[in-house]
């Protein structure tokens, strides 16, 4: 299968523009307002060539807005940004020549077959009939779509559709690929499959901006992660750095009464644990921990405070934990 | 399912034949996008056939009901009601087909095609132009089907020569083309299909009756005559009818064409503006 594919090539010097070295995505203090609502508030991120920038955040955090801006679909309100070395404001068409976009919803023509969808985009990009057909064969094979290539895309399952969508995004061999929640709604096998494809692309030098709600996904794919919340960057770093802020494992305690909760939180904080209220604010506490000894420490502290938890669970840090920890820290910082 | 394994090279093409290196011209883009929708029309002729239902039903109803009622005083002599009404049915069909062009654009916006094209070096006008050209082809097929059906089954016998008949059909298609742009503009701004369908129903349907479509203007109630005399459809229908039936009324051809040109120009500008707005 690999024999079918042309080996990677060095492109003849793109990206002269900004003199910012080899940054393929460069966002500086970008703000986007819809009326009085700040969808993005002074956001700055960068991604060097051949890396994956993960944008982590809940719905409404501003991830898609940033993707729309960087793919030239939406004008920014203030700040500046460049993609593939070209300034967004000056050279949108140059950028469109070098990017691929897989949005949250598959952008394929359901009336056309998978093959025709790929051929259509290749032809639009200027490929001749034969080159377009060859490109379609190549991408269909790579994405395991050969068997369904001539079926209408509307008959595809969610996973197939998403793969076709990604295949279509790659028709122009983009330098920068935008993946907006590419695995939302996919089954685990399809998700894994997509991750492997993305890893392959990155090894080839493609720069990827990935938005996701899953820390696990960002953890696996992203070189650096930026956490967005309500349009602001609330944290940035590698996956390891980010997780360190919430601890490697979290202990979630469920308590019977609000009084118990207040008492245990005070005791835990006194003992040096960053205990924060969990999703069920009145009943649960989330405690980040680094080592098993710390876990015993949590239990011992509770015991000493004379509180009995009705439920105690251990978990890997999730996006929620990162969020909660960050929200808690900023709440602590705010009055200062 | 052949899952790509680790270590698999990512898809690439050599720089020399990298598809995006040159990009394609606006003309090529329009051609490719038109071809795409035409192909969809051939594989799924539902819209073309469905679009034929209304004009054919109207044709049958009108000819069956009114032909027994006796002609109004100003009805042209020596012309059957079928002959009289057919050019109007064709114009009505042209308007309905134009509405479909707008609906097609809305569908492209819904299924993500527009979002996809926006992220590519594709001119915003290419999809709009393709939609209007596809509408033109759809209209042409429908005009042809209705005319052939009317001639063979119902006995439509226009008195104009073949050249005039073709000219009449051409004018009908130009009307459809210009209205297509009006509906594409509406689709680009409204981004929903329902308002377009309502527009067709609430505006075009009554305007057809308040025109020279089914009864000579002179036979309409006087207040309707006022409406009919400023109704662009009256000019359009008078002109296509005059050509097809070799009747007076050809003086309405110039205003009809002029109105269509204005609608087209305004439609193109409005459509481009509406389409360029962020999704």
Image (cartoon, rainbow, N blue to C red):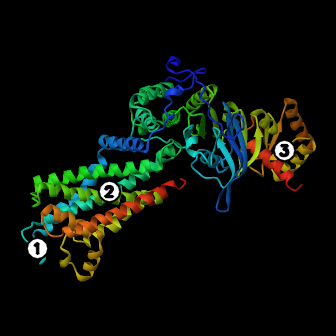
Dot 3: within a 10 Å radius of its alpha carbon, few (fewer than 14), some, or many (20 or more) residues? many
Residue B71: which disc? Answer: 1
User: Which numbered disc, 2 or 1, marks the residue that appears first in the sequence?
Assistant: 1
Most extreme residue toward the top is: A3
Q: Chain of mark 3?
A: A
Residue at label 3?
A275
Tell whether label 3 touches label 1 (CB within 8 Å): no
Query: How many numbered marks have been drawn onto this rendered protein structure?
Result: 3
Q: Secondary structure at mark 1?
A: loop
Residue placed under numbered mark 2 in the picture: B177
Q: Evaluate whether label 3 is on the same chain as label 2.
A: no
Residue B177: in sight, yes or no?
Answer: yes
Q: Position of residue A151 (x, y in %)?
A: 39, 33
Q: Nearer the viewer, mark 1 or mark 3?
A: 1
Rounded to the nearest whole Å, what is the CA distance between mark 3 and mark 2? 68 Å
User: Subunit of mark 2?
Assistant: B
> In the rendered image, which quarter contains the C terminus of chain A?
bottom right
Vertical placement of residue B194 versus A303, above or below: below
Residue A110: % across, % down: 42, 41
In the rendered structure, are the residues bearing label 2 and label 1 in contact, judged by CB atoms less than 8 Å apart? no
Q: Nearer the viewer, residue A175 or B262?
A: B262
Taking A204 as reference, is A284 left or right? Answer: right
């Amino acid at each position: 299968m690999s024999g079918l594919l042309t080996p990677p090539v060095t492109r003849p010097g793109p990206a002269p523009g900004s003199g910012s070295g080899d940054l393929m995505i460069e966002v500086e203090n970008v703000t986007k307002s819809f009326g009085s609502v700040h969808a993005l508030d002074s956001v700055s991120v960068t991604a060097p060539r051949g890396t994956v920038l993960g944008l982590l955040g809940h719905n409404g955090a501003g991830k898609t807005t940033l993707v729309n801006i960087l793919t030239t679909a939406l004008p920014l309100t203030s700040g500046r940004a460049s993609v593939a070395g070209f300034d967004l404001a000056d050279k949108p068409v140059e950028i469109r020549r070098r990017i691929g976009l897989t949005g949250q919803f598959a952008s394929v023509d359901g009336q056309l077959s998978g093959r025709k969808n790929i051929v259509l985009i290749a032809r639009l990009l200027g490929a001749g009939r034969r080159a377009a057909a060859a490109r379609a064969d190549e991408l269909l094979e790579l994405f395991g779509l050969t068997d369904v290539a001539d079926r209408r895309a509307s008959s595809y399952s969610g996973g197939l559709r998403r793969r076709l969508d990604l295949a279509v995004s790659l028709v122009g061999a983009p330098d920068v690929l935008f993946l907006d929640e590419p695995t939302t709604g996919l089954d685990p096998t399809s998700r894994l499959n997509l991750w492997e494809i993305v890893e392959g692309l990155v090894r080839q030098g493609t720069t990827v901006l990935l938005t996701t709600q899953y820390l696990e996904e960002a953890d696996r794919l992203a070189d650096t992660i930026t956490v967005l919340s309500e349009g602001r960057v609330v944290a940035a770093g590698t996956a390891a750095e980010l997780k360190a802020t919430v601890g490697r494992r979290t202990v979630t305690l469920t308590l019977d009464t609000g009084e118990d909760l207040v008492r245990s939180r005070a005791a835990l904080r006194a003992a040096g644990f960053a205990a924060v209220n969990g999703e069920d604010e009145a009943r649960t506490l989330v405690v980040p921990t680094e080592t098993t000894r710390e876990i015993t420490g949590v239990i011992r502290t509770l015991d000493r405070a004379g509180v009995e938890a009705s439920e105690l669970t251990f978990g890997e840090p999730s996006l929620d934990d990162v969020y909660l920890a960050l929200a808690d820290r900023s709440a602590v910082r705010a009055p200062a | 399912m052949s899952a790509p394994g680790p270590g698999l090279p990512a898809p690439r093409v050599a720089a020399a034949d990298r598809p995006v290196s040159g990009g394609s011209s606006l003309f090529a883009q329009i051609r490719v996008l038109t071809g795409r929708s035409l192909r969809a029309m051939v594989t799924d002729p539902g819209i073309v056939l469905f679009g034929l239902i209304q004009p054919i039903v109207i044709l049958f109803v009108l000819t069956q009901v009114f032909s027994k009622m006796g002609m109004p005083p100003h009805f042209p002599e020596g012309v059957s009601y079928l002959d009289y009404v057919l050019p109007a049915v064709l114009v009505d069909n042209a308007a309905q087909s134009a509405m479909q062009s707008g609906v097609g654009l809305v569908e492209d916006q819904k299924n993500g095609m527009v979002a996809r094209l926006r992220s590519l070096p594709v001119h915003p006008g290419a999809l709009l132009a393709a939609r209007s050209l596809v509408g033109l082809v759809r209209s042409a097929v429908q005009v042809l089907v209705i005319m052939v059906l009317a001639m063979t089954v119902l006995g439509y016998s226009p008195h104009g020569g073949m050249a005039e008949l073709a000219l009449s059909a051409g004018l009908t298609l130009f009307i459809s083309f210009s209205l297509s742009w009006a509906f594409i503009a509406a689709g680009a701004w409204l981004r929903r299909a329902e308002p377009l369908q309502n527009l067709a129903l609430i505006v075009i349907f009554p305007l057809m009756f308040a025109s020279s479509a089914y009864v000579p203007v002179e036979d309409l109630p006087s207040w309707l005559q006022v409406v009919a005399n400023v109704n662009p459809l009256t000019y359009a229908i008078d002109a296509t009818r005059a050509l097809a039936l070799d009747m007076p009324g050809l003086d309405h051809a110039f205003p009809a064409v002029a109105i269509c040109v204005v609608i087209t120009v305004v439609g193109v500008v409005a459509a481009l503006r509406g389409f360029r707005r962020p999704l």
